[in-house]
Image: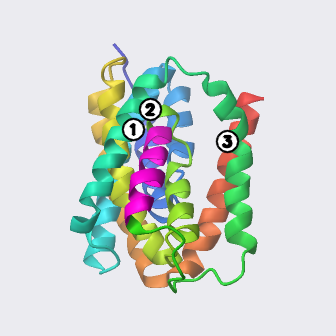
Amino acid sequence: MFQVSAELLMLLLAAGFVAGFVDSIAGGGGLITVPVLLLAGVPPITALATNKIQGLFGAGMAAITYARAGHVNLRRQIRPAILAFFGAVLGALLASTLPTDVIRLGLPILLIGVAVFFALKPGLDDVDKQERLSPFVFSLTFVPAIGLYDGLLGPGAGAFYMLGFVSLAGYGILRATAHTKLLNFASNVGGLAGFMLVASPLWALGLAMGVAQIAGAYVGSTLASRIGSKLIKPVLVIASTALAIKLMTAWF
């Protein structure tokens, strides 16, 4: 049975708090928590499953905080969230059967592209723009596709959700950030449901880190609600770039 010392537990809780803070603003919290879980000696498939437990708490708290601030109507997102859930279940079940190396090799390039898009594209602020896809088509196609990715691999899923809301749905950055969180919550739950069929998550550790995620997500989403794109854009660019670098050093 996996055991942690008091010092290691404090490190994992600190990682959960920081991940909740970053993820609530820009996504990419798994960049922090998955490596820490692996360094703690948790087997890879168990680390991914445990990461889904703690991650859903952070996404859930961020969704509630943004909703209370008036940036998202969670009831209107129930149907897209269901699609994200089932996409993630399928992704988690396929994780052990698909050639994910191809996706992993291309993922750093995609994340750098996300960072460049948000860093250099003019006019990205909290003002909504013209939508390129209707809400129905966006929910039916883009949302379950990112949900499937979240279940299959996971890193950067929040940033990809946000990119879709900005570039396809025409949302301003703050509104886009708020709308990613319930979907990210749903795909975390779906990914966990799928992983439970092939792995045994560390429930006690995941729940403890989840409490720390709640605290970090509350602080991050509260700040983002007050400051908007001036905070979200730099955090998103830094998080996406750091995640890309981390993946390249780990996989190449």
Range drawn in magenta: 136-150
For label 1, the residue is 88
| The stretch drawn in magenta includes residue 30 | no
Q: CA distance from mark 3 to mark 1?
A: 17 Å
Q: Residue at x 72, y 71 (%)?
A: 119
Q: Looking at the picture, does residue 212 appear above or below residue 133?
A: above
For label 2, the residue is 91
Say which quadrant the C terminus sits in: top right
Q: Residue at x 66, y 33 (%)?
A: 104
Q: Secondary structure under badge 3?
A: helix
Which of 12 and 7 lies nearest the eye of the viewer?
12
Q: Residue at x 40, y 44 (%)?
A: 13
Which badge, 3 or 1, is on the more N-terminal residue?
A: 1
CB under 8 Å between callouts 3 and 1? no
Q: Secondary structure under badge 1?
A: helix
What amino acid does circle 1 point to? Ala
Q: Looking at the picture, does residue 95 appear above or below residue 190?
A: above
What amino acid does circle 3 point to? Leu
